[in-house]
Image (spheres, rainbow, N blue to C red):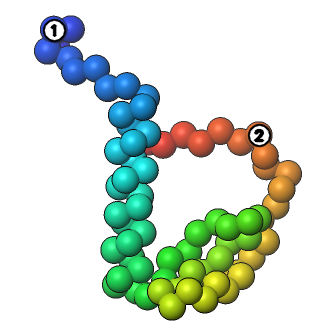
Amino acid sequence: MRKAKLKYISTRMVSRKSKSAFQEGAKNAMNVNGYVVVAHEGWVVKKYSDGRIERMQELDNNDQNLELILD
Protein backbone atom coordinates (compact mmCIF):
# COMPACT_ATOMS: atom_id res chain seq x y z
CA MET A 1 0.00 0.00 0.00
CA ARG A 2 1.28 3.45 -0.80
CA LYS A 3 2.01 5.92 1.95
CA ALA A 4 -0.49 8.36 0.46
CA LYS A 5 -3.29 5.84 1.02
CA LEU A 6 -2.32 5.06 4.61
CA LYS A 7 -4.29 6.85 7.30
CA TYR A 8 -2.38 8.06 10.35
CA ILE A 9 -3.85 6.94 13.66
CA SER A 10 -2.49 8.74 16.68
CA THR A 11 -1.98 7.19 20.08
CA ARG A 12 -4.51 9.65 21.44
CA MET A 13 -7.16 8.46 18.95
CA VAL A 14 -6.55 4.82 19.83
CA SER A 15 -6.68 5.63 23.53
CA ARG A 16 -9.98 7.51 23.23
CA LYS A 17 -11.64 4.90 21.06
CA SER A 18 -10.51 1.97 23.19
CA LYS A 19 -11.65 3.71 26.38
CA SER A 20 -15.10 4.38 24.96
CA ALA A 21 -15.33 0.81 23.61
CA PHE A 22 -14.43 -0.66 27.02
CA GLN A 23 -16.96 1.60 28.75
CA GLU A 24 -19.70 0.61 26.31
CA GLY A 25 -18.83 -3.06 26.70
CA ALA A 26 -18.91 -2.81 30.50
CA LYS A 27 -22.27 -1.06 30.33
CA ASN A 28 -23.68 -3.77 28.07
CA ALA A 29 -22.28 -6.51 30.32
CA MET A 30 -23.86 -4.84 33.36
CA ASN A 31 -27.23 -4.71 31.59
CA VAL A 32 -27.07 -8.33 30.44
CA ASN A 33 -25.41 -10.02 33.45
CA GLY A 34 -26.22 -7.64 36.27
CA TYR A 35 -22.53 -7.39 37.21
CA VAL A 36 -19.03 -6.79 35.82
CA VAL A 37 -15.67 -8.08 37.07
CA VAL A 38 -12.98 -5.39 37.36
CA ALA A 39 -9.78 -4.53 39.22
CA HIS A 40 -10.52 -2.04 41.99
CA GLU A 41 -8.21 -0.82 44.78
CA GLY A 42 -5.86 -3.81 44.61
CA TRP A 43 -8.61 -6.41 44.34
CA VAL A 44 -10.46 -8.26 41.59
CA VAL A 45 -14.07 -7.42 42.41
CA LYS A 46 -17.53 -8.14 41.10
CA LYS A 47 -19.59 -4.93 40.84
CA TYR A 48 -23.34 -5.48 40.77
CA SER A 49 -25.90 -3.21 39.14
CA ASP A 50 -27.44 -2.43 42.55
CA GLY A 51 -24.11 -0.97 43.75
CA ARG A 52 -22.85 -3.93 45.80
CA ILE A 53 -19.16 -4.82 45.47
CA GLU A 54 -17.95 -8.35 46.17
CA ARG A 55 -14.20 -8.91 46.61
CA MET A 56 -13.02 -11.99 44.75
CA GLN A 57 -9.22 -12.05 44.99
CA GLU A 58 -6.47 -9.70 46.13
CA LEU A 59 -4.03 -8.68 43.40
CA ASP A 60 -0.30 -9.30 43.79
CA ASN A 61 1.46 -5.92 44.01
CA ASN A 62 4.83 -7.28 42.83
CA ASP A 63 3.87 -6.88 39.17
CA GLN A 64 3.90 -3.06 39.13
CA ASN A 65 6.33 -2.76 36.19
CA LEU A 66 4.45 -4.89 33.67
CA GLU A 67 3.74 -3.42 30.25
CA LEU A 68 0.25 -3.79 28.77
CA ILE A 69 0.31 -4.78 25.10
CA LEU A 70 -3.00 -4.96 23.23
CA ASP A 71 -3.07 -7.13 20.12
Q: Are marks 1 and 2 in contact (CB under 8 Å)?
A: no
CA gap, disc 1 and disc 2: 38 Å
Which element type, helix, strand or loop, lies under badge 1?
helix
Q: Quadrant of the N terminus?
A: top left
6 displayed left or right of 46: left
Which element type, helix, strand or loop, lies under badge 2?
loop
Q: Locate residue 10, reporting x and y percent.
A: 37, 25
Amino acid type at circle 2 is Asn
Q: Quadrant of residue 53?
A: bottom right
Callout 1 crowding tier (Cα within 10 Å): few <14, some 14–19, many ≥20:
few
Q: Which mark is residue 65?
A: 2
Amino acid type at circle 1 is Ala
Which residue occupies the foreground of this view, 2 or 29?
A: 29
Q: Locate residue 20, reporting x and y percent.
A: 37, 53
User: Which residue is at a point 39% across and 76% down the rendered structure image?
Assistant: 29
Q: Quadrant of the C terminus?
A: top left
Q: Residue furthest top?
A: 3
User: Which residue is at a point 58% across and 69% down the rendered structure image?
Assistant: 38
Would you name the residue on which mark 1 appears?
4
Which residue occupies the foreground of this view, 11 or 59?
A: 11
